[in-house]
Amino acid sequence: MKYCLFIILFIFYPNAFGQTKFKIKEVETKNWKSIYYIVNEKGETVKELDTAKYSISLNDDNYKYFAVFMIKGESGWSAIDIHEKILFKVYNTSFGEPSPDEIIDNKVRIIDENNKIGFADYKGNIIIKPQFEIATSFYKGKAIIGLSCDKIPWEEHENESDCHHYSIVCKKHGYVNEKGEILELGNFTFEEIQNKIKWKTPKE
């Protein structure tokens, strides 16, 4: 019996130890170049990140299980753990400007290579595989989703290099629970679903 218990503990301990909180320290040089450092919960600098690889960081000063960067050679926002392993791609919340999703209700929106949206928890575990065209953050255990969606540009863009701003318009709306199960989906407007489940934006 003791032998079996030892095996079970041996299996689960590495997973527990693998999740480590850290934060990103940013130091700006005289030539306006940013150098990023990984700092553990003891306040010790674990590693200096390669500035040729990590270009933009919008992380705050809190200790978390992952950090979000724009990484050269990678598209969009990448979430990394303390060992620099890429865990997933983070959803950008505003079309036309850099704004990676934040942890809300202990969850963050993520995307796959087809720009489908899913969710990861605050520890960096993928809990709902990317599968939705559009999805809000969670509020009281529910998130609104959209189906058959189109990007509607705010205005004409003269150059491809210009910032492109869009609104998302979907023909169908519904909502899911924290398991990713679709509880309702149909010819509803966003406002109808919002009122039905009393969903609120994070700032409300």
Image (cartoon, helix red, strand yellow):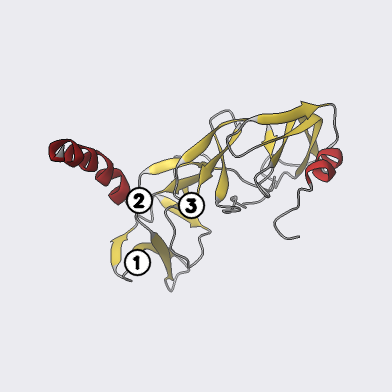
Three-letter amino acid code of the residue under disc 2: Gln
Q: Are marks 2 and 3 in contact (CB under 8 Å)?
A: no
For image coordinates 30% across by 44% down, the residue present is: 15
Residue indicated by mark 3: 68
Q: Are marks 2 and 1 in contact (CB under 8 Å)?
A: no
Q: Nearer the viewer, residue 113 or 175?
A: 175
* Image spot of residue 2 (x, y percent): 14, 41
**Corner quadrant of residue 76:** top right
Residue indicated by mark 2: 19
Query: For the residue carrying disc 2, how many other residues have a C-alpha within 10 Å: few (<14), some (14-19), or many (20+)?
Result: some
* Image spot of residue 177 (x, y percent): 64, 37
* Image spot of residue 113 (x, y percent): 53, 30
**Corner quadrant of residue 51:** bottom left
Local SS, label 3: strand
The answer to whether residue 148 is seen in the rendering is: no
Question: Is 171 drawn above or below residue 7 in the view shown?
Answer: above
2 vs 3, front mark:
2
Residue 102 is left or right of residue 172, and the answer is: left
The tag earlier along the polypeptide, 3 or 1, is: 1
* Image spot of residue 66 (x, y percent): 43, 52
Local SS, label 1: loop
For image coordinates 60% across by 53% down, the residue present is: 104
Query: For the residue carrying disc 1, how many other residues have a C-alpha within 10 Å: few (<14), some (14-19), or many (20+)?
Result: few
Local SS, label 2: loop
Residue indicated by mark 1: 41
Q: Quadrant of the C terminus?
A: bottom right
